[in-house]
Amino acid sequence: MIKYTLSFIVLLMISFSAQSQKRIDPTDKDKVLANALKEKFPDDNVALVTSKDFVTFGYNKRDQKVTVEHQAKENMINIDVRADIQAYSFYDGESSIEEFDIRYRNEKNAGFFIRDEAYQSEDLFHNDTRVQYTTIDFPVKGYRYLTNIIKHYKDIKYFTKLYFNGEYPVAKKTIVVVVPNWLNLELKELNFEGYDITKKVTNNDKGNAKIHTYTIENIEAMYKEESTPGPTYIYPHILVLAKTYKQNGKTINIFNETQDLYNWYKSLVNSLENDNTPIKDKVKELTENAKTDEEKIKNIYYWVQDNIRYIAFEDGIAGFKPDEASNVFTKRYGDCKGMANLTKQMLIEAGFDARLTWIGTKRIAYDYSTPNLSVDNHMICTLFKDDETIFLDGTEKFNAFGEYADRIQGKQVLIENGDAYILKHVPVSDAEFNKERFAYNLTLSQDHITGSVDKTFNGESRSSLLYYFNNLKNDKKDEFLEYYLNKGNSNIKVSNIETSDLLNRDDKINIAYDVVIKNAVSSFDDQVYIDLDFDKELSNFKLEKRKADYIFSSKKDLESTTRLEIPKGYKIAHLPENISVSSNNYDMDVKFSKDNNIIVYKKQFKIKNAKIETSDFEEWNGFIDQLNAIYNEQIILTKE
Amino acid sequence: MISRYLILLLLTVSVSVFSQSKEELAAKDFFWGANDTYKDANDIPKEWTNESAVIIYKNVNYDFHKFGKNVTYTTSIRKRIKLLDKAAVEEFSEFAFTKRFRSSKGRFTWKKKGGTFVGVKIIKPDGSITEIDVEKDAVEVDGETKIAIANLEVGDIIDYYYYRNEPFKTTYAFGFDPVETSLGEEYPIMDYKLFFETENDFFINFKSFNGAPELKEIPTEKKNMRRYELIETNIPKSEYKRWFYPLVELPSYKFQVYFARSGKFEDRALAFLPEKEDIIKTSVSKEEVLDLYDSRFKPDGDVGDVKSFFKGKSFKNDREKVIAAYYYMRHYYLTRYVEAFYAKESNISPYPFMVYGYNVVFIQNQKQFIRHFTEFLKRQKIDYNIVVGKKRYDGSMDDLLIERNVNVLVKVKTATPLYAEFFSPHTNINEFSPLMEGTDVFLLSSEKSKKRIDVVENGKLPTSTYLDNETKKAVTLTINDDFSGIEITSVNSFKGHEKSDQQYDRLTFTDYVFEDYKKYETESWIDLVKRKKDKAKYKKEMDALSAKLKTKQKERFEEAIKGEYGVEDVEDYTYEINENGRYSLESYFTFTESFKAKNALIKKAGPNYILEIGKLIGGQIDLDEKERKRTENVYMPYPRSFNYSITLNIPEGYTVAGLDKLNKTVDNATGAFISTAKIEDNTLIVNTSKQYKNYYEPNSNWDMMIAFLDEANQFTNEKVLLKKK
């Protein structure tokens, strides 16, 4: 019985796969090439010897749509000892994958089984994106595969841009776009500066199309870094602006100008029924006792924030068309468009002038001067009141009325206005708006430090804390506060916590508490060594081996003051040196001083534009080194 | 042809739609019908108003029916929950399930499909009820149905059920997955009901533990049908706790249901079945264990390979012989094939097992191991017992109920007994799960007849001590001349039960298969490949695979060491294996690591430096206030010790002050933390030992444990001053 088991496994294996038999060893030339590419791209496992995008256009008479065929041919080579990677391509209701094949270097089919699955997104409850993929293995260095993927777009609207960089570095990247004469298309070149991209435009043989050919050599893979600006800021790419096309002598607009983009968006909005019967009672309830207009608006805006859960269905047109306000209201959930529409309808119901508003968040580099579906990714509501324009974003939980999240600040908005549209910008606020103020008043008692602490939070530092706190389980809320305040350090005992109302998003948050800190004081002989910093903000913030700007979630402004009373009979033997540095993006300052018998240790960190640019890195890292030196330096007291 | 098939398909679809709706209504009626006594239960007790959510009613049902070989297995659960915060609303705002599925039980059949029916209703604080239209609101993608619950708010009650119907066909006896659970869950429960419905041919083992109520029989209208229920009220929520076995301490129940059609199949069922279907089995006797296993573990197997291995070898005694045979089998029946598995898994060879030929033994499960190993012992005329035991977290042998919880090993009755367990690549002789150490077991043997196992007696497995299970580290610390960085070299050794996790983590397959090939003079997988062209190709690809695994592993270790020593940037990391420690439980598995780091452990103090030397013993358990107030007993895996020897090369021109804080002693019956420090030839030598002395501590000893745990944690905060001369 036992003996059969192994032979059974063996038989199973034979019938299983025959593909590996055909595999062929890399040539010497490929091995040399792999080594050369590894030298150029030491952090990558796989490189593309060549990568060619070939884009052509067609016309579907039945649907009256311009279609796109995007072929991506890659010649992949393993530049590591071995590599196991996934080849994949996404598609959705507006596109399809016509061909997906993977061949050995001798062009024989490698026989990988291509899987097809729904793409599961953390953020979207349901979406129609699917992915075709397979895992491919490169058994030795220099091993190559040739992949060919053809993706078909039913409507040129959804074909928005072409990148040169991809998941792997490319020795030679070519993008060819064949634009027929009947199609008016602008290929807008973005972020080309600093890249050696050559461009050639020729006529095709028949003379009825122009061939745009772009080439670049030795282009890096997209950065595998966190907190980077959106890809449209940092990589060279071609934005595809489909303007008009001619059919039967007629010129038809696609997105010739912003108005066309607006018209399409507006057509989706116009098809809404806007039956507000279900929301009338709620609006009445929220506004009837309000004394001022502002209170009415706030009551509505905050109700949407607090009561509408973010659940998104991105399925076909639902990705662009808002859900009915009454639906969102009854279901108590929706996506950004649904929340924007509900906010709008409730405000209209209450007698205000509210409009739907399209916007691209900070991740997107474009504004509406380049009409294209990749210009925006978000929807909010605009309120016009007494010559003021106020933006309301129902997805921003605990966001106060008239305040704007960093992710939309400074961005251009497209506001509905009947057949026309209005362009405006979301106001920008200073770092100070998000001020965090910490005040520690401490004394030494034997081996411990004891004292009281006051912390205040404003702006986004406030809303993020409120949001986090209010989404905790009731029975975990007290625990969380303690943990939040001692940062999980059991040497810091927190007690007598008093907070301002942690449901109020209009006022700053105040938290006061007492602390007893162990193991921060060491005494050797007659000297007392004190570690006075319990937060050590930014200590991990050296930006090394990084290629892109660092983007914070919001602007930061921290002012932390620690006052330590010198015990009687002691004097200061040593205080660390002050440091400070300033640039367009930050003002950083650490000071030690003496105020009678009190040591005052003050940190002021201001990140003004929520980013550290690559050009700042050297100076910034120098500062972080100095800061860490201070964090590592002890204050010394000696007996008088 | 195609069209006819299509019609057929349409027909079945419409039939199933019809039957589904009928079943669906039955499911709904079962929970929310006229007999629902919880339809108006909306209030929660005052003491639970600050919870995240309170379960007003939880009802779990198991229903077993059959018609001949056709079994219908229905499980369902209903919860009626008051949601008291946003976190709870979020938790219950989305549901996902598989509407139609094919059962994986019994034999494969295309005919019948299982179905899941879900019902959700929401009760608002004003008492108004909305039932969710699951069919309308759900989206289905790739067979998974998802629903977002509309109009759900804090203060609402959500009342939902999952009803899962699973028909399947089986000729032979079939054991359903056992259920072993404590009554409590994430949220407190006001009323709880577990309900069973079965008929003839279904055998139930069921027992309540630790004060959980008993299962009660309810009279039924039919003779061959039986109903049982377990009812409890006011069950507090359960939370994760360190060193805790819920099934040993909390009110719990365990059960397993077996389907066996006739006497013949009943006999063959691999379970402790009750005598008759209408008896609920609550315990298993020694004799029943003997009855079930008398032929199951009969010696069997071809031990010719071992015989060949023994040729020309002589052994001092039986003990030596058994030890040699165990390790030989571990190689010949297991590690010899490891390379081939890797070759298969990484697509290097499509049929790597061919090279071994057909007539080979490959031991892949406990049963096969026991039979094979005892066949060897029988041939060698070495006396043995088969040990039948249970893991400690599952309670004692007196509480044996479910066959699957039984663990079996061999006790070889040599002068000092040896224990042999089914091996993995690094299992040693005399090594068995620490969770069985010191437990009471049954010892089976063949006394009267050599053909059957016919004797069962009580026995007890030996224990290990904290000295046997050791993690030992020798850490040398050198500080740069300018105090800008440090260099650490650590020699890490592990033995006893502390060893195997490290071996599986730290050894790649090439680290040990070649060791075994050499020791047993066997050929590697590549050597066995016959075609010259393939051999060269496979060699290259296996080497590449091994190099890749080693690189990945080293990257992982480099990350891990950052956490261990609390340093952010590590440079010049090296990793080297010194001893594999694979041929005895007592031998050390040893590896050496070294690295350089900046901004670590050193703090500037005027002209002097403070060194956080305590951090070198790694992170220690840092008890929070809640844990200090623990009321449960303490269940640990095994006694163990962590011994560190730290050597600091004192920088030239400096002396060390503050040694007094490095001398600590807390030593009590539960464990110890002892540290000493001394200066020797320009080095500071700190030795620490943390010991957990027992497997189990009653809660009354918790304070003693806190004492040594706290002392160890405090040690990590200790510093010395490097004082300029």
Image (spheres, coloured by chain):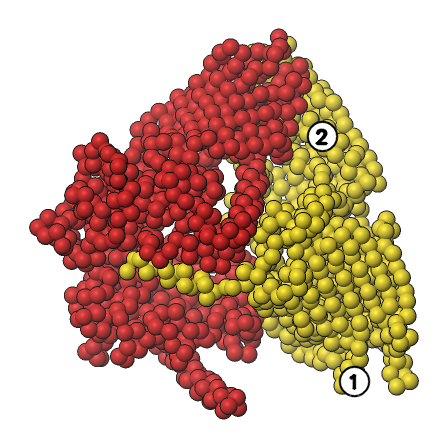
Chain colours: A yellow, B red
In the rendered image, which quarter is residue A330 located in? Answer: bottom right
Mark 2 or mark 1: which is in front?
1
At 63% from the left and 15% from the top, the residue drawn is B608
- Foreground residue, B498 or B157? B498
**Residue drawn at the location 48% of the way across and 71% of the way down:** B98
Q: Residue at horizontal 26%, vertical 71%?
A: B172
Asked whether the residues under marks 2 and 1 belong to the same chain, the reply is: yes
Task: Tell me if label 2 and label 1 are in contact, CB under 8 Å.
Answer: no
Does residue B219 sit above or below B293 in this rendering? Answer: below
Element type where label 2 sits in the image: helix
Towards the viewer: B501 or B549: B549
Examine the rendered structure and indicate whether residue A205 appears above or below residue B586. Answer: below
Residue A469 spot, x, y in % from top left: 59, 50
Q: What's the residue type where badge 1 is placed?
A: Lys
Q: From the viewer's perspective, is A104 left or right of B78?
A: right
The N terminus of chain A is located in which quarter? bottom left
Most distant residue in the top direction: B725
Q: Which residue is mark 1?
A: A61
Query: Badge 1: few (under 14), some or many (20 or more) residues near its Cα, within 10 Å?
Result: few
In the rendered image, is residue A4 in sight? yes
Q: Amino acid at mark 2?
A: Asp
Tell me: A231 left or right of B6.
right
Among numbered discs 2 and 1, the one appearing first in the sequence: 1
Asked which secondary structure carries label 1, the reply is: loop
- Image quarter of residue B160: bottom left
Q: Residue A276 appears at what percent x and percent y? A: 69, 77
Looking at the image, how many numbered discs can be counted on the residues?
A: 2
* Rendering coords of residue B394 (x, y %): 30, 50
Mark 2 belongs to chain: A
Quadrant for residue B543, please give it.
Answer: top right
Residue hosting label 2: A625
- Residue depicted at x 18% and y 46%: B379
